[in-house]
Image: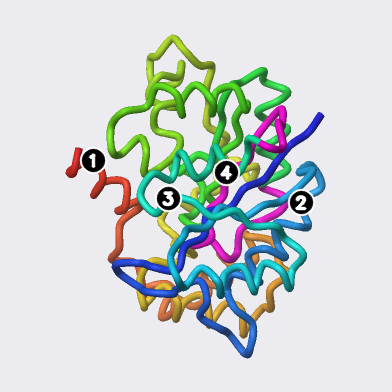
Amino acid sequence: MKILAITQARYGSTRLPAKILREVDGTTLLEIHLRRILKAERASLLKIATTTEEGSAKIIEVASKAGVACTRGSVDDVLDRFYQTALPEQPDYVVRLTSDCPLIDPSVIDAVIDFTINGGYDYASTDPASFPDGLDTEVFRFEALKEAWEKAELRSEREHVTPYIWKNGSAKGGSIFKTAAMANPAGKYDASHYRITLDEAEDFEVLKALIRALGTGRGWKDYIDYLERHPEIKTLNSRFGYNEGYEKSINND
């Protein structure tokens, strides 16, 4: 079975330009992100879906250093960029990740893959109601991606890759795809109010503090426990909402 992990990475960003190329003690957040994904045992291959922007050359340089292949595509039609990255590989399943999650956890990636396959789902993801923002992982059949690429029409569906799938999924009352969300394996441990993603300048300060305190090889709960012990760091970015980029796309539909 071939399971392809694809992470989206672009140079431009409205809120925080070149954010994934910011460094902590000489290492870019993109490199940290890639090296953590590569520790996932269930993914067969990792690729980057980047853009044709001039600055993407720097992303390709970091990827090459980590031994990860890149493809370049549309800035705005991310669904097409993502599909074209997956197409040559003809995988059974695709894992969608985003490079604004530098502390993505390989154990979570593996868990969502197993959850999807063992449950017979066409699509499954981490549950934002129990995971912190910054561990976002989606796994889906390649055939579901192909159908979305063929049929998705709304701007929000093209800019964010998977809305067509999950909006037409059983978890949302749809009938086309069998879908589900995986709660974090810590059971009742609710980490949804924590933020270890990278969209704002304050997010970078939180990530920098975590990496300098704990390094880049810890599990996600270690980082969250540190924030719990250091509320002065946690509150730096606590005013920002979850998935604001998708909400913006919805408003533009």
Ranked by sequence position, the earlier of labels 4 and 3 is 3
Q: Position of residue 129 (x, y in %)?
A: 44, 42
User: Please, what secondary structure does the residue beneath circle 4 have?
Assistant: strand
Q: CA distance from mark 4 to mark 3?
A: 17 Å
Q: Using a 10 Å C-alpha cutoff, classify the residue at mark 1 as few (fewer than 14 neighbours), some (14 to 19) or many (20 or more).
A: few
Residue 27 image-quadrant placement? bottom right
Q: Which residues are magenta?
A: 88-108
Residue found at the far bottom of this picture: 25
**Element under disc 1:** helix
Closest to the observer, 81 or 133: 81
- Give the residue pinned by disc 4: 96
- Where 105 sits versus 177, above or below? below
Q: Residue at x 70, y 62 (%)?
A: 36
Which residue type carries mark 3? Ser
> What is the crowding at mark 3: few (fewer than 14 residues within 10 Å), some, or many (at least 20)?
some
Label 3 belongs to which residue?
Answer: 74
Residue shown at 23%/40% (left/top)? 250
